[in-house]
């Protein structure tokens, strides 16, 4: 794709600009994936903000808001490629679409608000130690684990409190 075609298709961004501005350029190259504008833009979106949790639809809406012509099917394909390349991870939480996040190599767990869908992260050393102890006690070799806590976030609790007072 020529630079002018790239500008028309993806908005006013060139491959050279992507190379200059995004650290993801070298990360993508290290995985063996071809460096394309959609891949660079999606990976950089996750690198911009720590602990960002997005669905494919969230990514697609952000591109629409930026007037970038990247289709939803392309977003899905790229997200799954980045997961296969271990640059992103994905989680399927109860009653929600798949959530993607940057693979920072850390071990963390999630808090999910059942009212607004907010996803938060936490890491507790006591839980990590206990998890290893339990596996050892049961003669179990852990490969992976997930811990997801469901409840109401502070914002939704405050909203419910205001509704009760005024309702």
Image (cartoon, grey):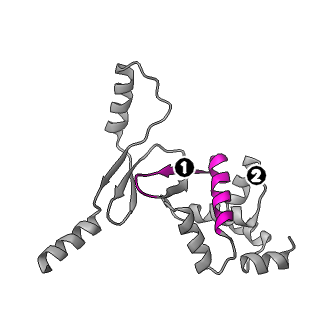
Callout 2: 10 Å neighbours few (<14), some, many (20+)?
Answer: few
**Residue 162 shown left or right of residue 132 in the figure:** left
In depth, the one of 72 and 108 nearer the eye is: 72
What element does badge 1 sit on?
Answer: loop
Residue identifier under label 2: 33
Where does residue 82 sit, x and y in percent of width and height?
A: 65, 53
Quadrant where the C terminus sits is bottom left
Query: Above or below — where is 11 with respect to 78?
Result: below
Query: What span is in magenta?
Result: 72-96
Residue at point 67%, 70% (across, down): 71
In depth, the one of 21 and 45 nearer the eye is: 45
**Residue 81 lies within the magenta run:** yes
Give the mark nearer the N terminus: 2 vs 1: 2
In depth, the one of 96 and 157 nearer the eye is: 96
Real-space Cα distance between discs 2 and 1? 19 Å
Residue at point 62%, 79% (across, down): 66
What element does badge 2 sit on?
Answer: loop
Query: Above or below — where is 65 with respect to 55?
Result: below
Residue at point 80%, 75% (across, down): 6
Residue identifier under label 1: 104
Residue placed farthest to the front in the image?
Answer: 95
């Amino acid at each position: 794709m020529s630079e002018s075609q790239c500008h028309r298709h993806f908005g006013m961004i060139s491959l050279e600009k992507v190379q200059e501005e995004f650290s993801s350029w070298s990360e993508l190259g290290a995985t063996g994936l071809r460096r394309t504008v959609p891949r660079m833009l999606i990976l950089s979106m996750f690198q911009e903000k720590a602990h960002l949790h997005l669905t494919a639809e969230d990514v697609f809406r952000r591109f629409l808001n930026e007037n970038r012509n990247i289709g939803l099917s392309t977003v899905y394909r790229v997200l799954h490629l980045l997961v296969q390349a271990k640059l992103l991870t994905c989680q399927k939480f109860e009653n929600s679409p798949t959530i993607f996040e940057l693979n920072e190599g850390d071990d963390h767990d999630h808090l999910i608000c059942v009212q607004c869908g907010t996803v938060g992260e936490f890491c507790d050393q006591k839980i990590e130690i206990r998890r290893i102890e339990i596996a050892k006690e049961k003669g179990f070799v852990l490969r992976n684990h997930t811990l997801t806590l469901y409840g109401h976030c502070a914002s939704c609790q405050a909203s419910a409190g205001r509704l009760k007072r005024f309702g």
